[in-house]
Image (cartoon, rainbow, N blue to C red):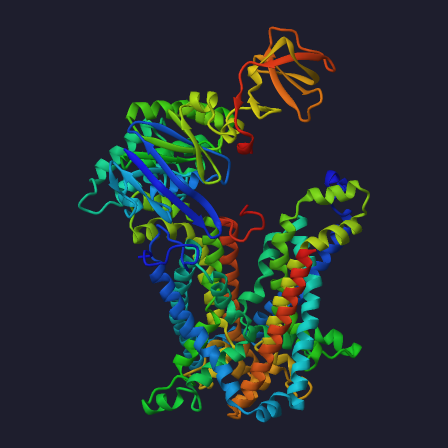
Amino acid sequence: MIRIQNISKRFGAFAALHGIDLEVQRGEFIALLGPSGSGKTTLLRIIAGLEFPDSGQVFFDGADVSARAVGDRGVGFVFQHYALFRHMNVAENIAFGLSVKARAARPAKAVIKARAEELLQLVQLDGLGRRYPRQLSGGQRQRVALARALAIEPRLLLLDEPFGALDAKVRKDLRRWLRNLHRQMGLTSIFVTHDQEEALELADRVVVMDAGRIEQVGTSEQVYMQPATPFVAGFVGESTRLPGGHLVRPHDFEIADGGEPLLVDNVFRKGGAWRVEGSLRGAPGVLEIDIDAADAAPALGQTILIRPRRSHQFTERAMP
Amino acid sequence: MTKSAPRGSTRLLRRSVLPGFRLSMGFSLGWLTLIVLIPLSTIILKTTGMGWDQFVAVGFSHRALAAYRLSFGTAAAAAMVNAVFGLLVAWVLVRYRFPGKRVVGAIVDLPFALPTAVAGIALTTLYAPSGWIGRWLDPLGIKVVFTWVGITIALVFVGLPFVVRQVEPVLADLGKDVEEAAAILGASRWQVFARVILPAIGPALLTGFALAFARGVGEYGSVIFISGNMPGKTEIAPLLIVTQLEQYNYAGATAIAAIMMGASFAVLLAISLLQAIMRGR
Amino acid sequence: MNRIATSPVTERPATRRLLIGLALGFLLFFLVLPLISVFAEALRHGVAAYWASVTDPDARAAIRLTLLVAAISVPLNTMFGVAASWAIAKFDFRGKSVLIALIDLPFSVSPVVSGLIFVLLFGAQGLLGPWLMAHDARVIFAVPGIVLATVFITFPFVARELIPLMQEQGKDDEEAAVSLGASGWQTFWHVTLPNIRWGLLYGVLMCNARAMGEFGAVSVVSGHIRGETNTMPLHVEILYNEYDFVGAFAVASLLAGLAMVTLIAKSVLEWRFELHQPGARS
């Protein structure tokens, strides 16, 4: 239902996006994942109509909306730092989108009020309508921002680093909650993140971006297990590069007779595994491998024999 | 409305979703042109319109030269006093706690709020031989009123807040950690101040100095009462402009104004170059 | 206190007290005493003499003119300040820093020169002088000249205050409003204006203080016609030069009172809304 066609954008001498093409289906939950400067936020803002591409088009349901003003696109946008109106209380913030409609299209005051109440319930902030943004916690502000965006019944919900400013625990709770909300309301959502864990956990499909280009689009399984480019292999999940251009995930190593000898430099517990750092004889660089925590931890200075179970190979030319 | 802006990186305006650029920009530029640019350009017009001889005859007469010396000299002296005491006041306001601190902080801005003529007559009365302060100085043979000392005191009054308000935020933002690091490395408190704090606030202090100096060179209201206005001795340059105007010598007034502005801009330019060097270090 | 005293990054109590004493002494002599002396001199011959000076017809005319000049110039520069800061803070365009520098220009011009330029433009020998004369219109030595000079002098005040404030606030709020369907005016009235109102008030306050107190520029263009083109600061000068010290200081005390009200209001804004507080904006 959303089609992005050949979008390019420069800021002065800096090329933020090069010829981006992307399609998003109705009801999908899409993550734009990439390091800072990869162009993901610019792309999100172009879809919203907050930023204008130098070339290319954006289609909603087949209609070219490139020239349409942001207020007429029917998108909900959740800003990274929420952009809540400080001088309005929570209910007024949520009602804003309805109360600025042209008189003919504006619902009656009572209707707006009821709608704000409804949304407050939806985001589990019932009774906090008269509070001001500064009296709320980060997670609560985030949910107000979401309710405000949802009030105009957008066909597309866009979120810029929605959990970026929150602490780890709140972030986890909100993530799960947002996922449920997305399903419940049948929304189509796109969110920007630099946190791969967040992207892999939440999104139906992940769009991995770097330096203004899309590196790969796929399910979390696909981008993790079948990275299309060395960048994706390196950015999504951990990996170690072996001589010859093989990229191997730490858990894709096994201890095996006849493997390569690894001199153990450091061992520590990481989740359900031992993380072993060491170096291959005669090769520069540090190798990270995970071995089952049920096994005994190797001692420092010990040499163990290891072998990759599976690896991703890219031609040397494509290596970063 | 911004659609007509040319595309590509050479365009003047980056397209934005927010409206009102043309309206606000148009009004701003129009008002700026009418109120500031056109009137100021008359100085240039008038200066270029007069002959070189005439320009030199009035602009560099003995009387005018004496006035420039006095104006620039007292402004520099006052700005120097303000650099020292302004830094002291800013330091005390940022670093220490004492009763009445908020009131003191508010008082610092008095010269911004008090009309200069009021300051002028108040200072003159205070430092006159019969005044509250003058009666203590007079027996010591210190004459303030109708001398360059009085002019400097008036300029210290008007210039103080410029230094304090420039230095204060920089001092407040200066992390204690660098001072702690210096102290751990064995620096004495004075060494920390001279080697760590002063270089960090140097550019701000210089900006404050420059602002106080520029204000002092052009200052009129607070000075004319205390200066006595003796041609060649205590006649400041702005007063000389007024005198020329009262004699309907527009050309003379303009020549002096042009020279003053040129000299002020040259000094400010030199200071900003110095700042660039300090920052680049 | 003890803990602070032993900290490596502050001074010994004695040094501290000495520095505080020096700073306060300096402020007392240079700022506080002049302020007190204004009121003391004004009341030197009692309340009756003070009252007579303040209610003198020429003094009342000066007060009226000062209020009129401020009432015209402050709103004009407020509108300009809001428009300029909107254009500068919410849009990216070339030459922005040049525009900001030009707005600050009146700050670096001597008040006397600020008056002079309007004499050169509108005076009898000025560029537009003959045309004005032919149409029997007066600008110099009349109220329009005083207003113009005041507008010039106070030109940057509101813009100067709002530009950094609006730049710091960024565009997020406005973009959020627009994305929710608000029009330009709705965004300005419901979102931007509430965000900048205290900064705006602060700028207006300082603009007004300067507009009412301006001396040099106004002195050049006014012609000092008693009861007609004398503002309060000019009236103070005339009375002072006529050795009517009580009269001069009585009118001056009104201006000093205005300055104190301005300072108090300004301080309240600073404390209450954290404007200009060092570090408060981080």
Q: Residue at x 65, y 84 (%)?
A: B67
Could you say where residue C2 lies in the image, as x and y percent from the top left? 75, 39
**What residue sits 46% from the left and 46% below the top?**
A15
Looking at the image, how many numbered discs can be counted on the residues?
A: 0
Residue appearing at x 39%, y 84% in the figure: C139
Vertical placement of C246 versus C202: above or below? below
The residue nearer to you, when weighing B136 against C10, is C10
Q: Position of residue A32 (x, y in %)?
A: 42, 33
Q: Is residue B95 or residue B59 the one in the foreground?
A: B59
Q: Quadrant of the N terminus of chain C?
A: top right
- Horizontally, residue C53 falls left or right of residue A298, namely left
Is any part of residue C25 visible from this angle? yes
Q: Quadrant of residue C87?
A: bottom left
One can see residue A52 in this view: no
- Looking at the image, is A13 positioned above or below residue B47? above
Q: Residue furthest left?
A: A104
Q: Which part of the image, by quadrant, shows the C terminus of chain C?
A: top right
Measured as percent of width and height from the top left, residue A139 is found at 44, 30
Please determine whether, in this image, residue A296 is positioned above or below residue C272: above
Q: Nearer the viewer, residue C236 or B195?
A: B195
- On screen, residue C226 above or below A320: below
Q: Quadrant of residue A22?
A: top left
* Left-right relation of B127 to B187: left
* Residue A259: percent from left, percent from top: 64, 12
